[in-house]
């Protein structure tokens, strides 16, 4: 049986002490590392996803400005269409050449959120984050203990783990590794990554871990099922049978509790197996 593991964004900046730290992130990744060391011979493949941002990015403060010349505050600023278009607009692009493009992005984001609501998931309004996982910085690196465990697996198997970066397009959030929130027609890297989806779908079982549970992990997990099933619930149920959610191999941002709550309802709806890192593959 081909068993795979995918770890979403296990990066320094998402661990305690990082630029966008998730409480419990470091411990969660330590547990994943310990699991890999324990079951490495049984894992056919390991996939790692990595946020890779520029300082200028649609989700970073410097891309937006108000009438007073102030950038939005990270974490607490969420933008809706009325905040950037029309008489009640508060924010505009800090670079005037990007104004229409940034406005269109926020407007088109409604399509993605409508898709979420149809699935019983919570909407994710455009959120401003502190700058994180910047290309070339230590914060983009894989958490140290996990990296050591990944190297052990590579040494045993004599082949590399699969690493997929996301988020380098400055005009699109890229929570899910499989597609950007709003794909950019001029940038294929933001469109659906069918190569990765098909590769993972060839496995007999796929275990999921990583950060953060209520953003990048959740969106990647849901997109994987949706892109294969294409609205066919019977196919979605079949795909879900191959999935294992490692409940202690992740941690949530927690700022919007409904995100995690409704994600867990989604897992229950599709009868996804829930396991822990110390019990998996025993």
Image (cartoon, rainbow, N blue to C red):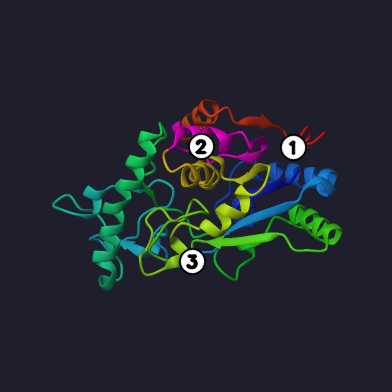
Indicate left or right for 41 with 187 as reference: right
- Which residue position holds label 3? 168
State which mark lies toward you, 2 or 1.
Answer: 2
Q: Which residues are magenta?
A: 232-258
State which quarter of the image contains the N terminus.
top right
**Mark 1: few, some, or many residues within 10 Å (few <14, many ≥20)?**
many
Q: Position of residue 247 (x, y in %)?
A: 65, 34
Q: Quadrant of residue 282?
A: top right
Is 170 one of the magenta-colored residues? no
- The disc, 2 or 3, on the residue closer to the chain's N-terminal end is 3
Residue in view at x 35 percent, y 60 percent? 71
Q: Compared to 172, does 205 lie above or below?
A: above
Q: Are marks 2 and 1 in contact (CB under 8 Å)?
A: no
Indicate left or right for 32 with 64 as reference: right
Residue in view at x 68 percent, y 46 percent? 26
- Which residue position holds label 2? 235
Is 241 one of the magenta-colored residues? yes
């Amino acid at each position: 049986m081909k068993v795979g593991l995918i770890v979403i964004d296990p990066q320094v900046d998402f661990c305690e002490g990082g630029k966008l730290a998730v409480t419990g992130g470091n411990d969660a990744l330590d547990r994943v590392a310990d699991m890999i060391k324990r079951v490495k011979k049984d894992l056919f493949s390991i996939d790692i996803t990595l946020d890779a941002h520029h300082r200028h990015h649609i989700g970073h403060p410097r891309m937006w400005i108000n009438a007073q010349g102030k950038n939005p505050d990270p974490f607490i600023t969420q933008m809706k269409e009325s905040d950037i278009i029309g008489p009640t607009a508060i924010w505009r692009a800090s670079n005037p050449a990007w104004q229409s493009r940034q406005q269109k992005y926020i407007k088109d984001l409604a399509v993605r959120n409508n898709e979420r609501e149809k699935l019983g998931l919570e909407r994710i309004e455009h959120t401003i984050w502190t700058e994180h996982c910047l290309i070339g910085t230590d914060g983009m690196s894989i958490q140290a203990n996990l990296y050591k465990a990944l190297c052990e697996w590579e040494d045993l198997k004599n082949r590399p783990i699969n690493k997929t970066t996301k988020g380098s397009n400055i005009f699109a959030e890229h929570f899910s590794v499989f597609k950007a929130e709003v794909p950019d027609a001029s940038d294929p890297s933001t469109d659906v990554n069918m190569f990765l989806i098909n590769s993972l779908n060839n496995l007999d079982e796929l275990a999921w871990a990583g950060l953060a549970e209520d953003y990048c992990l959740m969106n990647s997990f849901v997109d994987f099922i949706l892109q294969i099933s294409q609205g066919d619930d019977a196919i979605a149920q079949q795909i879900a049978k191959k999935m294992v959610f490692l409940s202690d191999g992740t941690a949530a941002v927690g700022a919007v509790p409904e995100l995690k709550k409704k994600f867990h309802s989604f897992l229950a709806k599709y009868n996804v197996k829930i396991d822990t890192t110390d019990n998996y593959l025993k």
